[in-house]
Amino acid sequence: MNIKYTIYNFDNEIIKHGSCIASSLNLQPQDGEFLIIGHINPETHKIVNHIAVQKTQEETNQFRLNKQLYQTVAFNGQENDETLNQKISDHFYGLIDVQQWRHDNYKILRKKFYPDAIEYNDAQVKINSGDPSLYAEGMDQQIDYIEKCFDVKIRFPKE
């Protein structure tokens, strides 16, 4: 029967989990590592004096925030501001200033919310087709594309 274990280091940082047969437990930790029986969840627990203890809510929130900082907020580029702000807030467990995040990450937001460049390319083909009706349609399409880009720039300013 396999025994679940958690490995942690001198800084009491949980670094990995595993399971093995009892006779192999002593082979699992490397130099500077320690083993504790059971899978200890680093989100909700920490190691203190070689014992797993429950984190405070503040410590759990900080762990979640640190974890989320390296993951992208899930949005599809169609959200209105209220929905987008809620998604950002939810992603970071309500622990950040949403407007500051939007300001700091305007490039990510612009990239996701800009219209598809295919719209612009299609407009150029129509403009250069030599057909007067396609030319007019292409010009309208190009103006619409540029307006959408400006709307995104205004919505997600650099400053």
Image: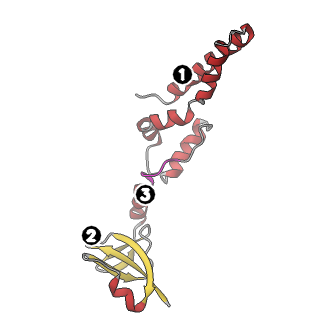
User: What segment carries the magenta color?
Assistant: 67-73
What kind of residue is marked 2? Asp
Q: CA distance from mark 2 to mark 3?
A: 18 Å
What kind of residue is marked 3? Lys
Q: Nearer the viewer, residue 14 or 44?
A: 14
Colour scheme employed for the rendering of this structure? secondary structure
Task: Classify mark 1: helix, strand or loop.
Answer: helix
Q: Earlier in the sequence, mark 1 or mark 3?
A: 3
Q: Quadrant of residue 117?
A: top right
Task: Quickly name the residue at label 1.
Answer: 150
Q: Residues within 10 Å of mark 2 (few under 14, many from 20)?
A: few
What kind of residue is marked 1? Phe
Q: Is residue 61 above or below residue 118?
A: below
Q: Position of residue 78 (x, y in %)?
A: 62, 37
Q: Is residue 139 above or below residue 19?
A: above
Q: Quadrant of residue 35?
A: bottom left
Q: Position of residue 69 (x, y in %)?
A: 42, 51
Residue 11 image label: 2
Q: Nearer the viewer, residue 16 or 128?
A: 128
Specify whether 137 is left or right of 31.
right
Residue 67 image label: 3
Residue 63 lies in the magenta-colored region: no
Q: Position of residue 118 (x, y in %)?
A: 62, 28
Which residue is drawn at the image coordinates 37% and 82% (left, top)? 36
Q: Earlier in the sequence, mark 1 or mark 2?
A: 2
